Amino acid sequence: MLAVFAKAIGKPPEELRLPAMASNDSKTPEEIVNKFQSLWPDSAVYNLPHGNFMALSHEAESPIHPRSIVVLDDIFCIFVGTLANIADLRHHYGLPRQATEAMIVVEAYKTLRDRAPYPPDQVFKHLDGKFAFIIFDARTNTLFVARDREGSMEFQWGMARDGSLVCSDDPKIITEGCGKACAHFPPGCIFMNGSGLTSFDHPLHKVRAVAHEDDNGNILSVYFQVDLYTKIPSIPRTGSADNWADAALVKGE
């Protein structure tokens, strides 16, 4: 799977660019999508507003961790993997037995959107399985990206030459499209373009970028991890206690 979002929409963490500061060998969004289509000729590409793209191919797909895409009410979702508690989630959201994982996470996103302000960890911490997914709400230009706690599914993100956000489960696409300006998406985390990175298991702690340097101080790579030593001040409760359960959104730094 592949998703490319313009910088103004995707708002990728600037730390992704650090390893490529010396030499920017990344490609344009159009070149990245064209490369994906050349590697996977059967792929379906969705051209979204403002020059954004989402693409999916079933080639080389794992039978136990399939890829799927669904479009519901102008909400686009690409999902790879499986949910172990899918039956419970269908019942929780009142969905039929035919509802797929992608449909379930779209319904979870709708719950988050329609009940705002509502901490996303309160919705997505109940997802149990091996997965990664990307949601884009074309009506509100909201981007939502998540990966399971164990990081079971291959999933990386990076920056294109113009600063666009690139997400994919194909390491080759990320490496060729983003050069060194990329990293593994942190396990157990959620990224929203309006609020940044947060951990759905440790929502009261910041998710920080950590640079890996060589002996000369050159940044070789960047990875993101939860900083368990830094706590985020709680947001004062101004409404329903259910809406302000126990967490605030955090920004990756």
Image (cartoon, rainbow, N blue to C red):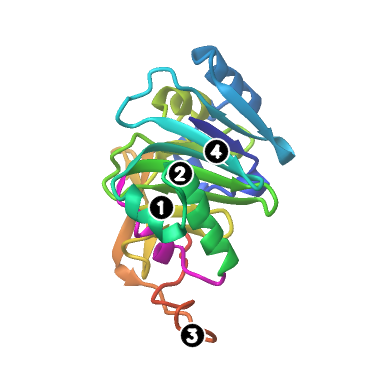
Mark closer to the chain start, 2 or 3: 2
Q: Is residue 124 magenta?
A: yes
In front of the other: 180 or 35: 35
Disc number at residue 72?
A: none
- Which residue type does callout 4 highlight? Val
Secondary-structure class at tag 1: helix
In the rendered view, tell whether residue 116 sits above or below residue 93: below
- Which residue type does callout 3 highlight? Pro
Label total for image: 4
Q: Does residue 217 appear in the picture of this structure?
A: no
Disc number at residue 70?
A: 4
Dot in front, 4 or 1: 1
Residue position marked by numbered label 1 in the rendering: 90
Q: Position of residue 190 (x, y in %)?
A: 43, 54
Residue position marked by numbered label 3 in the rendering: 236
In the rendered view, tell whether residue 37 sits above or below residue 16: above
Dot in front, 1 or 3: 1
Instruction: Specify start and end residues of the magenta stretch as a single range.
Output: 116-129
In the rendered view, tell whether residue 163 sits above or below residue 26: below
Q: Position of residue 37 (x, y in %)?
A: 56, 17
Q: CA distance from mark 1 to mark 2?
A: 7 Å
Instruction: Rate crowding at label 1 as few (under 14), some (14 to 19) or many (20 or more) other CA atoms within 10 Å.
Output: some
Secondary-structure class at tag 4: strand
Mark closer to the chain start, 4 or 1: 4
Q: CA distance from mark 4 to mark 1?
A: 16 Å
